[in-house]
C-alpha cells in the first residue's frame, strides 16, 4: 500500500471550503501584503502562544534574524545554540553578524544539553538560542537560570513546536522572544513561506515590526536599516483558519506517536523517542535510532521499496557543513550529535495518519529486523 512521509493535500481537503472562501476574499479585497487579516492573525497567534505580541515575518529564518537585529546582537557577539538543529538557526545568527557557539545535544531529548551551556559562555556571549526540536520544548528553567546568572538574553526557535507546552506554558512564551516558521511542512504550516516572532517585550516587537518593513513605521520614513520580511494576506487567512485546528492536529500527532511507541516498544535494535517529564511533545517528527549508519541506511531502503516515506533530520550536523567551515569546528567536536545523525530515521508523521498506516510502517520495521 505504501505510506507517505507527509500528506499536505489531505489536510487541505478537510478545510477546503473555509480556506477557498478566505483566500478568494483576499483576492477580492486586495489585502495582499499586511492589512487587517495579517493583524487579526497576529493577535490570535499571540493569544494562542500566551505572548503579548506576535509579529509576522516572511520566514522562520527571517524571524530569528530580526530578533537578533532588534536585540542589538551582532558583530563581536556570541550566541550559544545547539549543534543538533536545522541550519536556519545558524543562518540567523551569522546573518545578524554574530558568531554561533555550538553545544552538544542531550542524549534523551535531542535538544541542547543545559549542562553544557556554562562551559560555552565567554565575555562575548550575549544570548542563548534554544531550539525546541521535533516538537519537544527545551529545558527552559535550566536554560533561563544560567542566562540570568550570566546576564544573557534567551530566545526560542519554535519552528517545530507550535502548541507544545513546558510545565504547562506554551512554547513561544518561555523566553525573551521566540521565532517560528510556518513553512508548509511544519505543524502549523502556511501555503507558502511565512514565519513570526512572539514576545512580551514591546520594544523588541516594535523594532522587529519596523525592521521587517524597511526600517519604518511611517511610510517613507526610515528610522533604521531594515528589509522586507512581511506576512501576506493569503498566508494570514490560511494560518488563522489552521490555528483553530492546531490543538486537535497536535493531539492526533501525540496519538500517532503513542501508537508507534506501543507497537515498537519490544522491538530490539531501535531506540524510541522520549519526552522529558517537564515537557509536552507534539511530535512534529517521530524519530527512531538504529544501531548504526549501515542499519539505518538499509532500513530506509527497505521501507522505500515498500513505498513508505522516511527522512533524516538532519544527515550532516551544522558544524560539518561545507558552508560553515569558517566557524572552525571539526568532526569529533560534538560526538553525540555526530553519532546520532548517522543512526536516525524519521517515520511518516502527520495528523491524519491512520492506525492502519502506522501498523504498516511498524510491521515493515519488524520484518526488517526479523522481529
Ligand atoms: C524550518 C526551520 C527553520 C526555518 O524556517 P523557514 O521558514 O524554512 O525559513 C528554522 N529553524 C528550525 C528549527 C526549523 O525547523
Image (cartoon, grey):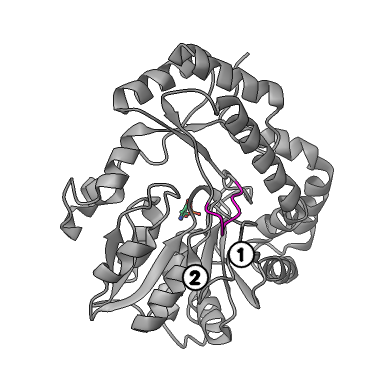
Residue 314 image-quadrant placement: top left
Residue 232 image-quadrant placement: bottom right
Q: Nearer the viewer, residue 270 or 216?
A: 270
Direction from residue 128 to residue 216 in the image, left or right: right
Q: Identify the residue at horizontal 27%, vertical 42% (top origin).
A: 338
* In the rendered image, the vertical position of residue 286 relative to residue 189, given as above or below: above
Which element is circle 2 on? helix
Please say whether residue 211 is visible from this viewpoint: yes
Image x and y of residue 121, in percent: 27, 73
Image x and y of residue 200, in percent: 59, 80
Which class describes the residues within 10 Å of circle 1: few (<14), some (14-19), or many (20+)? few
Quote the CA–CA distance across marks 2 and 1: 9 Å
Q: Identify the residue at horizontal 51%, vertical 65% (top origin).
A: 179
Image x and y of residue 280, in percent: 61, 54
Q: Identify the residue at horizontal 41%, vertical 66% (top origin).
A: 129
| Label 2 CB-ligand 1 distance < 8 A | no
| Label 1 CB-ligand 1 distance < 8 A | no
Direction from residue 155 to residue 243 in the image, left or right: right
Q: Earlier in the sequence, mark 2 or mark 1?
A: 2
User: Which residue is identified by label 1?
Assistant: 167
Where are the magenta residues, as a range? 276-282
Question: Is 281 in the magenta?
Answer: yes
Question: Is 140 in the magenta?
Answer: no
* In the rendered image, the vertical position of residue 139 relative to residue 347, given as above or below: below
User: Which residue is identified by label 2?
Assistant: 141
**Label 2 close to label 1 by CB (< 8 Å):** yes
Which element is circle 1 on? loop
Prevailing SS of the magenta stretch = loop
Amino acid at each position: 500500500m505504501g505510506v507517505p512521509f507527509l500528506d499536505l493535500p489531505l489536510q487541505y481537503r478537510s478545510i477546503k471550503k473555509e480556506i477557498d472562501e478566505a483566500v478568494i476574499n483576499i483576492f477580492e479585497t486586495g489585502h495582499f501584503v499586511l492589512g487587517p487579516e495579517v493583524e487579526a492573525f497576529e493577535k490570535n497567534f499571540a493569544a494562542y502562544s500566551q505572548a503579548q505580541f506576535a509579529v509576522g515575518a516572511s520566514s522562520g529564518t527571517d524571524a530569528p534574524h530580526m530578533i537578533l537585529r532588534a536585540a542589538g546582537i551582532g558583530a563581536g557577539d556570541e550566541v550559544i545554540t545547539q549543534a543538533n538543529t536545522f541550519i536556519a538557526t545558524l543562518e540567523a545568527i551569522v546573518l545578524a553578524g554574530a558568531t554561533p557557539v555550538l553545544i552538544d545535544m542531550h542524549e534523551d531529548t535531542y535538544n541542547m544539553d543545559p549542562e553544557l551551556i556554562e562551559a560555552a559562555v565567554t565575555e562575548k556571549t550575549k544570548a542563548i538560542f534554544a531550539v525546541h526540536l521535533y516538537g519537544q520544548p527545551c529545558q527552559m528553567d535550566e536554560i533561563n537560570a544560567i542566562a540570568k546568572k550570566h546576564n544573557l538574553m534567551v530566545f526560542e526557535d519554535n519552528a517545530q513546536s507550535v502548541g507544545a507546552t513546558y510545565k504547562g506554558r506554551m512554547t513561544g512564551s518561555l523566553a525573551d522572544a521566540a521565532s517560528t516558521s510556518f513553512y508548509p511542512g511544519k505543524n502549523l504550516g502556511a501555503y507558502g513561506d511565512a514565519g513570526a516572532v512572539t514576545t512580551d517585550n514591546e520594544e523588541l516587537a516594535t523594532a522587529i515590526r519596523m525592521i521587517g518593513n524597511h526600517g519604518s513605521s511611517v511610510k517613507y520614513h526610515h528610522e533604521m536599516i531594515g528589509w522586507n520580511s512581511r506576512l501576506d494576506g493569503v498566508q494570514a487567512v490560511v494560518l488563522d483558519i489552521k490555528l483553530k485546528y492546531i490543538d486537535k492536529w497536535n493531539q492526533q500527532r501525540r496519538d500517532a506517536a503513542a501508537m508507534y511507541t506501543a507497537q515498537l516498544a519490544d522491538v530490539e535494535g531501535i531506540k524510541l523517542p522520549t519526552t522529558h517529564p517537564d515537557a509536552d511533545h507534539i511530535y512534529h517528527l517521530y524519530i527512531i535510532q538504529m544501531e548504526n549508519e549501515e542499519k539505518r541506511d538499509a532500513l530506509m531502503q527497505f521501507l522505500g521499496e515498500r513505498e513508505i516515506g522516511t527522512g533524516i533530520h538532519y544527515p550532516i550536523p551544522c558544524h560539518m557543513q561545507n558552508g560553515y567551515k569558517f566557524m572552525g569546528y571539526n568532526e569529533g567536536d560534538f560526538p553525540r550529535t555526530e553519532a546520532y545523525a548517522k543512526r536516525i530515521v524519521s517515520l511518516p508523521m502527520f495528523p491524519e495518519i491512520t492506525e492502519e498506516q502506522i501498523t504498516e510502517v511498524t510491521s515493515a520495521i519488524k520484518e526488517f529486523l526479523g522481529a
